[in-house]
Image (tube, rainbow, N blue to C red):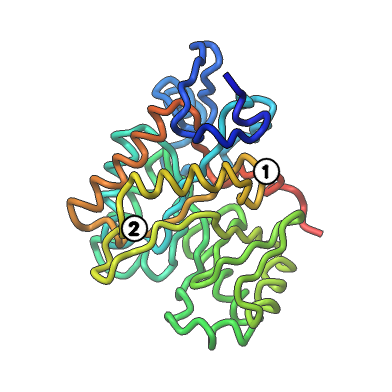
């Protein structure tokens, strides 16, 4: 058998390969099994499990035939947040919630969902701004100082202990080793966030919505996209894929089922490790 990750094989697809992996080689350091969660609960307060509590894990601890996926969900707490948590609990898989500050206080349901997020050890909390740019993105990024202020308000009001952030309406990266701006008019605002100490994370793959604001397409199609990204080395960091979708797309039974099956099939392939975004390579390096 050819080793897919040692060299690209045009005759095999990533998820279609039959894996011969011994029980001892299965890695449980990315929120991938019940044993790990029990150990995690022993050391982490369930009251507010933030990114600061997540241990650093080196790539050397991951089987070279595996790839790392970071499940991230934006705009919570929102419609669909509770459904998201049910899926994660069912599959016992970790994820990162990029929160909008004003949503945490928007309604009693959102306040309740915020408490569910804070108390779940499978979830870590990160910053997606306070205002979500009021959904007027071009205007928002014209004032870099106001952008930083907006993120600072979210950080303080949500009591986030790290400065991991994602910009609303933009796929922007600002780490020591990755500098990407999808829409150049946002460059100054992104640079100011980095200067303020924010570690800005975008994404490699997004599950987008339909016109009805439900998940568009099938879990099979998304798995093929995961396959393609790894096969063609399209990740921002090799072997690491940041996946994005949004809480509010998980309101209907079909969307809930599709996300559930997506995660289930990735798990059953035995070729992936799931991690929280605070374990992304070099994210904890001191910014220059």
Circle 2 packing at 10 Å, graded few (<14), some (14-19), many (20+), is: many
Distance between the Cα atoms at labels 2 and 1?
25 Å
Residue topped by disc 2: 247
Identify the residue under disc 1.
281
User: Residue, x 60% and y 43% (percent of image)?
Assistant: 240
Residue at image position (25%, 53%) is: 255
Q: How many marks?
A: 2
Q: Of 75 and 204, which appears nearest the observer?
A: 204
| Residue sticking out furthest to the front | 11
State whether residue 141 is above or below residue 164.
below
Q: Is residue 247 above or below residue 187?
A: above
Residue 269, percent from left and from top: 42, 28
Q: Which is more N-terminal, label 1 or label 2?
A: 2
Q: Are marks 2 and 1 in contact (CB under 8 Å)?
A: no
- Asked if residue 63 lies left or right of residue 134, the reply is right
Q: Where does residue 62 sit, x and y in percent of width and height?
A: 61, 27
Which x, y percent locates residue 162?
60, 53
**Residue lying at 76% horizontally and 54% vertically, measured from the top left:** 177
- Which image quadrant is residue 9 in? top right
Q: Secondary structure at mark 2?
A: helix
Quarter in which the C terminus is drawn: bottom right
Camera-side residue of 41 and 177: 177
Res. 90 image quadrant: top left
């Amino acid at each position: 058998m050819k080793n897919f990750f040692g060299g690209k094989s045009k005759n095999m697809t990533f998820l279609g390969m039959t894996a011969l992996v011994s029980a001892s080689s299965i890695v449980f350091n990315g929120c991938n099994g019940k044993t790990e969660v029990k150990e995690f609960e022993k050391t982490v307060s369930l009251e507010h499990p933030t990114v600061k509590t997540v241990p650093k894990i080196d790539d050397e601890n991951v089987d070279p035939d595996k790839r790392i996926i970071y499940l991230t969900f934006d705009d919570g707490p929102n419609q669909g947040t509770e459904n998201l948590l049910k899926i994660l609990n069912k599959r016992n898989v970790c994820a990162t919630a990029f929160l909008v500050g004003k949503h945490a206080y928007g309604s009693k349901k959102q306040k309740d969902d915020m408490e569910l997020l804070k108390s779940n050890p499978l979830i870590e909390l990160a910053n997606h701004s306070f205002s979500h740019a009021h959904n007027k993105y071009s205007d928002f990024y014209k004032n870099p100082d106001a952008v930083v202020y907006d993120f600072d308000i979210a950080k303080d009001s949500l009591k986030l202990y790290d400065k991991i952030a994602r910009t609303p309406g933009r796929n922007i990266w600002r780490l020591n080793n990755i500098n990407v701006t999808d829409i150049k008019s946002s460059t100054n605002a992104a640079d100011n966030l980095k200067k303020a100490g924010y570690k800005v994370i975008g994404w490699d793959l997004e599950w987008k919505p339909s016109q009805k604001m439900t998940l568009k397409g099938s879990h099979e199609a998304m798995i093929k996209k995961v396959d393609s990204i790894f096969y063609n080395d399209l990740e921002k960091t090799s072997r690491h894929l940041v996946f994005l979708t949004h809480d509010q797309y998980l309101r209907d039974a079909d969307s809930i089922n599709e996300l559930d099956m997506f995660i289930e099939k990735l798990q059953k392939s035995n070729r992936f490790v799931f991690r929280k975004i605070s374990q992304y390579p070099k994210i904890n390096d001191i910014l220059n």
